[in-house]
Image (cartoon, helix red, strand yellow):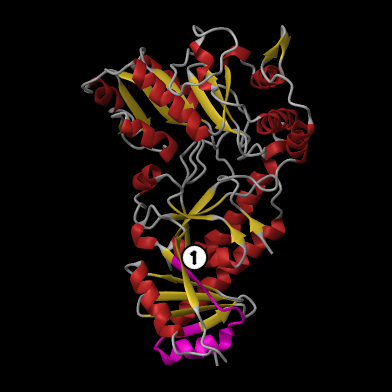
Amino acid sequence: MTVFLNNAATSFPKSPKARQALLDSLDSCPHDLRTSAGQIGELEKLRVSIALALDVHRECVFFVSDATLALNCVINGWIRANPEGEVLFDNRSHNAVSRPALAAGGRQFDAYGKNEDPLRSWISDLPRVPCLICLSWASNVNGSIYDIASYSADIKRLCPAARILIDASQLAGSCLLDLPNDADFLVFPGHKFLYAAPGAAVLIARTALVPWMLGGTNDVGISRTDKFVEVGTPNMPAIASLAAALEETKRLGREAFSNAHQMRELLRCKLEPTGDLELIPTSKGGGTTSVISFHCKTMSATELGSILGQEGFVLRAGLHCNPTHHEALGLVACGTLRFSPGRYTCSEDIVEVADAITDILATYRAIS
Amino acid sequence: MNPLEFIMVGSRICPEMENALVYEAVTSPGIELARLGCRLESLGFRAAMFGSRATLIARREEVLLTAKVPNRLTLSRVASEEEASSIFRMVFEGWDGS
């Protein structure tokens, strides 16, 4: 018996359409992937398909093997081109953003906490002019979805020269994806809430990318540096899977994520009254993804997560690669227990995990 | 019965939180949880089973041990892998599972 509640890490099961696209691609003869004798290659067809699904120009769409690599490409490329500039990242950032930003000498800022007003003076006091500002669209810790459109517009007014990078890893597939006007770069993978295969992520670049990884890929000439981000052999099956998943998600509309949200609410109703688990609050006024986390007051989150793992429940305990947000919550020492139901989670799964938690905590109290 | 063996697998769950690591070990298959519970209680643990008696949880002072059939064990609230290993040794060395 396995109950999967870890879609924020990677989804399971995959969308049947995304799985079929992966298999079809694996089984098809790999003709020239990019262009051949003036014909548009398969990769470019997929690029157009994704551009149409996202309503962006196809020249803005890049494929990278995962979101972490895509974020590294943007941050490292941009700081290489702007060595005197400052990289800023918000206090909800996943390690995939905070680590490359810190390695580039970047700074964290309080984006969604109580210090929003002083942001203006804080930015003006920086010794270096911000060149890249990284924002999280949704938290992988508590599921909060932030008003990224108005926030990025505010940031743009404060720092007109800075480019804005948005990490949409938790957002894509969790709600309707409407690209903010002020986003220069936006990244999301296929394997989370889009239910596609791992191995492909989309990088939207409305501003010309600065090469960070170099390779042999270029169908026009060495002056076309913007495609250098796509180095090496593209993972066509994963990209085909992502494209199919994105089309499906767009076609389904709210139906694509309504079940996951209902399962989140059911989890909250089942677990919050136990008294042992304290719900991690979400930001006021914004929506949420299906991610929901709890602080365990009786035993540590990692212990409870470990026992639940032994019992066949796949979920996440600890910091979820996001010590930044846990610090903001004051929970970096103890971590949280995170559930991320998905499109294919059923109410029986939620009842089973809630019953198991009740059983474990009652047993723990009996031996304490 | 032959003496039970155990092998430390290492730590898991959240390597970013050094004070919250859970150490895992596997034993020879076929461990009987009821007997392990008695063994642990003889060593000063308080033990109880749950999940249709397929999992055992035991506590001595701060140390928390869980065992799951057929042969999975975890230990938390210990300072290091060495301390985890020494507790597993205390439980399993010289014990034939009866």
Residue A189: x %, y % from top left: 58, 34
The quadrant of the picture occupied by the C terminus of chain A is bottom left
Which residue corresponds to the image point at 72% horizontal and 27% vertical from the top-left? A247
Please report the residue visible at 48 percent of the width from the left and 84 percent of the height from the top.
Answer: B47
Residue, disc 1: A304
Q: Which residue is at 42% across, 78% downward?
A: B88
Amino acid residing under circle 1: Leu
Pick whichever, A129 or A96, lies toward us. Answer: A96
On the picture, is A288 further left or further right than A342? left
Residue B45 is inside the magenta segment: yes
Q: Position of residue A98 (x, y in %)?
A: 38, 36
**Would you say residue B66 sits in the magenta stretch?**
no
Which stretch appears magenta?
Answer: B23-47
Residue B55 in view of the camera: yes
Q: The residue tagged with tag 1: helix, strand or loop? A: helix
Question: In the picture provided, is A100 more to the left or to the right than A173?
Answer: left
